[in-house]
Amino acid sequence: MTKLEISTKSAKSAKSERSEKPAEQWGNGLEFLFSCISLSVGLGNIWRFPYIAFQNGGGTFVIPYLIALLVIGRPVYYLEISLGQFTGRGVVKAFDMAPLLKGVAVGQVLATAASITYYSSIMALTLRFLVASSGSELPWSRCWESWGSDCHDGSAGNGSGKMSPAQPYFEREILHEVPTIDNGVGVPNWQLVACLALAWLVIGGVLIRGIKSSGKAAYFLGVFPYVVLLILLLRAVTLPGAIDGIIYFFKPQWSELLNPLVWYAAVTQVFFSLAICFGTLITYASYNNFNRNVYNDIVIITTMDSCSSIIAGCITFGILGNLARETGVSDIGSVVKGGAGLAFISYPEAIARFEYVPQMFAVLFFLMLFVLGIGSTVGMGSCILRVVRDQLGLRSPPIWKLATGLAVMGFSVSIVYMTPGGQFVLNLVDFYGVSFTALILAIGELVAVAWIYGVNRFCADIKFMMGIETGWYWRLCWRFITPGLMTAVLIYMLLDMSALEYKGVGYPTLAHVFGFFLAALGLIQLPAWAFYAIYKQRRQPGNFLQKVRAACKPSDTWGPANVQLDASI
């Protein structure tokens, strides 16, 4: 047991604690693989990657994206899967390896809780579109009198200065969006609230039977989106003008390679696309067989995630190339809308122009978005529930009660996104509560594992668990390259930060105060838990620095998931 540096006392304590919580595992390795695929391949692959690539040099963006995948995406993915599988516990308990930085794990859980609320709101929007797609005519295929005179049955980029039908349909019929939230966010739309309730009913239904249920669902959640993507890809590449759009997507602009903004965009895309540093991967891996060799899983999952992004890019720019030709627009860039607009304006607009059965393609597309949302939210919900069960031990209520409570609370909070000012709130929560804090917490995670716990010790744990040596590439990335690049991205983000806006509209002071509160709630966990870890050493002899060092050592409950005392001590 010397390689793991765990004393007899700590090993016994670890085994005792594990006996207090229900032992759950995936039914087989494929359930774990497909669950990770459904978690990592999400909405960001469909609408965010194509637009970010277009914004940052087209094909040139792929170069830093692939580099970031190799030196940040895969190393962190491997680290989190190995950590979760080794300890067999949720993200907060996993940080017993470095109690001084346990606040990193708590902050990640809070960021995950914020994420699941607005992810469910996007699922509600997809359900609303799904219902609308089942009629005899797609309602955004033409302008309606109630929308006013600023709608034109063509492209928003056709020089008329008017909007295409998909835009007023999304903003006025679906969102009932207000131009500003200076006077409040408004009253929730009952149709969207009903869709939100159905979304949470599905999320809760998958979570309610525990990891066994979500593991079985992962086969469908992980495969179905690819089936739809391939169908849409085949349809997109056969559209007139599609090849022009795809060339536009891949056409390199080499001068952009020297632009730090391109690298910043690539790193953040990899970071959020793979769902790393949110605690979800550690949670999923904690249900693995202790000796499972996850190395091949890492390669498969990260490769499929990248491929889905590239496929989505080809579909996006294929249909936008067709849209440009149909409307006589020479610049494909003028028909691209980013963010939610790409998923709920540009895609529906292009699908409405399909010559044959556009309703079928619309149903497939929005059903795919909904399924992608399920995969992501179930992973987030599993992470939150695992943390609660780890903390309560034998006192933990049955999983169905916890899942029901999470669904009710999540639904209640998410109603705010169903208001006319809901997209303002979503943008605010995403920036302050998730994006800003997640990168700082990610750096803290790398510091905790690679520097406080130690790379050599962690690699010894991996060898003990899987029987394989960890190469220099992984060691260099964990210790230097990955945290170094993340720190550079964080510095660039802080230097380039400006007042948050939504569609060019600023936020009232009260909204910024709420945003700073969200960010502080996540970041305050770092010093708060560090102080608590040092305070617990108050009875130990020595000065303050010695107490800090003691707080950096693994706690008595830290140890491998299947520690065998009589065999290894």
Image: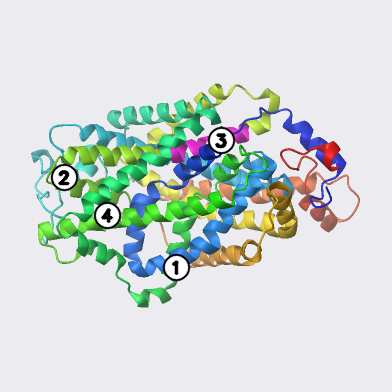
Quadrant in which residue 558 is drawn: top right
Secondary element at image label 1: helix
Residue positioned 48% across, 36% down in the render: 378
Do residues under tags 2 and 3 come within 8 Å of each other at their CB atoms? no
Do residues under tags 1 and 2 come within 8 Å of each other at their CB atoms? no
- Marks 4 and 1, how far apart in space? 21 Å
Report the amino acid beneath label 2. Answer: Ala
Secondary element at image label 4: helix
Residue wearing tag 2: 352
Q: Which mark is residue 298?
A: none
Residue wearing tag 1: 64
Residue positioned 46% across, 45% down in the render: 37
Residue wearing tag 3: 28
- Which region shows up in magenta? 374-388
Vertical placement of residue 508 versus 34, above or below: below
Question: What x and y, as percent, mark residue 562?
Answer: 73, 38
- Marks 1 and 2, how far apart in space? 34 Å
